[in-house]
Amino acid sequence: MLLLAEAPTIDTGNSAWLLVSSALVLLMTPGLAFFYGGLNRSKSVLNMMMMSFSSIGLISVLWLLYGFSLAFGSNDGEGLNKFIGSFTQYTGDKTDTIFAEIWGTTGIPVYAFMGFQMMFAIITVALISGAMSDRTKFAGWLVFAFGWFTLVYVPVAHWVWGGGFIGAEIHALDFAGGTAVHINAGAAALAVALVLGKRVGWPKESFKPHNVPFVALGAGLLWFGWFGFNAGSELTVDGTTAVAFVNTQVATAAALLGWILVEWIRDGKPTLVGASSGAVAGLVAITPACGFISPVYAVVLGIVAGAVCSLAVALKYKLGFDDSLDVVAVHFVGGWIGSLALGFFANDAVNGAITDALGADNGLFYGGGGAQLLRQFEASGIVTVYSFVIAAVLALAVKYTIGFRVSAEAEVEGIDVAEHAESAYDTSPAGGGSSAGAFALAGISPSGAAPESSADTPAEKVAG
């Protein structure tokens, strides 16, 4: 008599934590919309926020249809798995087979892991949009987002996490997305900014944030969601999860202090925008290292990232590229800082997987020599070059086909109305007319007294 194979056992604790983490990571994209929207000018804030929200719609569907399979599927083709996953493993309607599968030894359903990684793909694409605010056609953005996700994010995710050559052969470390997310998006942001060109009036005109409370709200939502981003990436609930959680908090706090300290010394006053940006820089920098370093070095990393990213904002003025909302300074530079920090601070006493399962070495400060630093540099460099080149080609293709930039007139008057037929702030009265006109129709002046003559009515003065 043949015994039926037992169904795989689901670990309810791990699964619950990953589903909660997935929801936290999804929240980061609306948080990014508020962060970017507040930093933007009021006349194009909706266009800016739409790029984040549209990423949720577009990338969710693409991830289910083919993104997850290509990024995390296993390709049996000779040598092909180094570069891309399976074209068929998780594509199409595979509910009957995938439904019962467990991801590795975690006790987590495959669909839970698929959903978690879906949220990563969404926000990585959305991050790029900050470099192109105030001047981008919405249709151009959608086409670019589709192409970059397919040709860049999916293969890079496979290289780093899905069994590809960066993780499996170079043995570079990336706990939650320093290379796959932040360096990747930052390099693309630089390419797009160069292709689009400078905004009308930049840098002579003022492009100050139009809503600082939005900026702080967005940073707060990002900070909150990032605990799912980082601690959730352990996939299980254990000591490494706790270390990643604590490191996320203390590194972000330290980076906030590092950024405003630079502002205080350089400009004489610390700002809420600076504190918010510093927090994001810290979140970026700790992302690749959060599960591999001790909390003390997480603080060191945070302070360095906050200070250096604050100083890096000046690069766009010195080099002449208009990265509207400093994606390069925060995500690209911060991602590189976090990735290289592993070459100094990685410690297998914090996470034994560094030397056991991942085939990497301890950092320089823990007796590993310079080998891991070279690996981190190589991986970060490969992702930088690949993402920049493909993003530039895609941006040029969009530019010379459907167009990537709105007209100068639409840019000056405001993209929100030109591209979306709406505005963020309706300043007209609820009745649709001016208050002066309403007083005139009532036969009184705004002060309550009757006008002396018809020629003096507020309505006629407004009309004149």
Image (tube, helix red, strand yellow):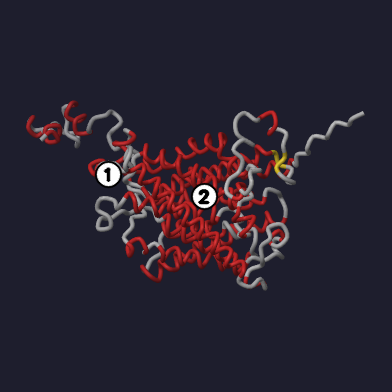
Is the C-beta separation of discs 1 and 2 under 8 Å?
no
Q: Horizontal and vertical percent for residue 4?
A: 85, 31
Please give the residue where the numbered disc 2 appears in the rendered image. Answer: 222
Q: Is residue 20 visible?
A: no
**Residue 400 percent location from the top left of the image:** 31, 42
Is residue 389 something one can see in this rendering? yes
Tell me residue 449's x, y (percent). Answer: 16, 33
Going 27% across and 55% down the picture, which residue do you hit?
202
Q: Secondary structure at mark 1?
A: helix
Q: What residue lies at 71% left-to-right and 50% top-to-bottom?
A: 237
Q: Sequence order check: which comes first, mark 1 or mark 2?
A: 2
Q: Is residue 168 above or below residue 402?
A: below
Is 389 left or right of 194, judged from the image as shown? right
State the mark number for residue 411. 1
Give the quarter of the figure containing the C terminus: top left
Q: Secondary structure at mark 2?
A: helix
Q: Residue furthest right?
A: 1
Q: Amino acid at mark 1?
A: Glu
The one nearer the camera, 31 or 212, is 31
Which quadrant holds the N terminus?
top right
- Indicate which label's residue lies in the foreground, 1 or 2: 1
